[in-house]
Amino acid sequence: MQTAQPIGVIDSGVGGLTVLKWLQAKMPHENFIFIGDTARTPYGNRSREEITRFVADMTAWLNKRNIKQLVVACNTITVLGTDTIRGSYPFDVIGMAKGSRMVPLVTKNNRVGFFATDFTVSTGAHKREIQKLCPQIQVFGQGCPKFVPLIEGERFGSPELKAAIHEYAEKLKAHHVDTVLLSCTHYPFVRKEIEDEFGPSVTVLDPAERTAQDALESLQKRHLALTTGIGRAEVCFTADLERGKRLAARMLDLNKCDFRLIDLKKDPGLPGDISPLKSQAQGILGNQTV
Ligand code: DGL
């Protein structure tokens, strides 16, 4: 493994961009290859078999691009089990943080809720992990199947989105939670609206920063972290490139991104549009090996 190899980041769609934002902030020297599987989003109401097949397509594609680490910027894929991915590839696999280290620092009444896809809630993974560390905390999961299609469809500020936020928040309010985790990476796109709906007595947490920190620490432990140069992100979508770019503009610094429409069944090749900045960064970083 070489430090100059890129880091792969995957999600079912644009949600993973909310994690890529934190990854770029914590690891400004690294190069990232992001895949949002916008052709097949959402994953959250699909079967385990289907999701497993889609993930295999993305990881095989990224493996051909010689990544040194994979960040699973998707809770639905994370709860499916990152061990299966980890076992078959040489790179390190980091899943989304489930909040067990964050919520004990925030909750005062030990009643915590989380918003996630139906698939994620059905596995009970978040509840199990939080209660393993803090058995006194009661955890309430709320599936939010309307959110991903509305966010992917750029329906920000629409009456449908407001109604969906109200509907799901009411369910958690009934449990008197004082902390709510956004356990689907799409939801930080509407974090402000969710916070407004709950009001100041509830703290809304996004586990993306913790996940990015986990990714950085894992690279440092393996002596694979880059410490110089300016990193870039190759942002790939499997459909709707223009929509992907518009949504990325809400999260990322576009000056540090190159966009690409990809076909997961075809050989990844290399991006056509390597900018001078990227060539320069590769020149600086290319010799660092371990
Ligand atoms: N962004 C994803 C997550 O964190 C998946 C959303 C979906 O495709 O349903 O769970």
Image (cartoon, rainbow, N blue to C red):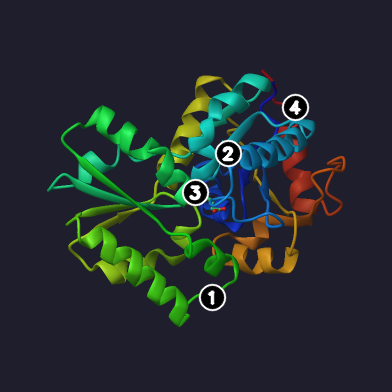
Mark in the foreground, 2 or 4: 2
Residue wearing tag 4:
287
The local crowd at label 4, few if under 14, some if 14 to 19, many if 20 or more residues have their Cα within 10 Å, is few
Q: Residues within 10 Å of mark 1 (few under 14, many from 20)?
A: some
Alpha carbon separation for disc pair 1 and 2: 28 Å
Separation (CA) of disc 1 from disc 3:
24 Å
| Residue at 79% in and 45% down | 264
- Asked if the residue at label 3 sits under 8 Å from ligand 1, the reply is no
Please, is residue 212 above or below residue 45 in the view? above
Q: Is mark 1 within 8 Å of ligand 1?
A: no
**Quadrant the N terminus occupies:** top right
| Residue at point 87%, 52% (across, down) | 272
The count of marks equals 4
**Amino acid identity at mark 3:** Trp
Give how far apart the Cα atoms at labels 3 and 4 are. 26 Å
Q: Which residue in the structure is indicated by mark 1?
A: 155
Q: Residues within 10 Å of mark 3 (few under 14, many from 20)?
A: some
- Tag nearer the camera, 1 or 3: 1
In this rendering, would 230 be left or right of 131?
right
The residue singled out by tag 3 in the image is: 22
Instruction: Please tell me how crowded label 2 is: few (under 14), some (14-19), or many (20+) other residues with Cα within 10 Å.
Output: some
- Image quadrant where one finds the C terminus: top right
Q: Look at the numbered disc 2 and give the secondary structure of its residue.
A: helix
* Res 48 label: 2
Dot 1 or dot 2: first in sequence order is: 2
* Residue 90 visible in the displayed image: no
The residue at the point 62 percent across, 42 percent down is 51
Which sits in the foreground, 218 or 41?
A: 41
How far apart are the two marked residues, 1 and 4, measured between alpha carbons? 45 Å
Observer-side mark, 1 or 4, equals 1
What amino acid is found at the position of numbered circle 2 in the picture? Arg
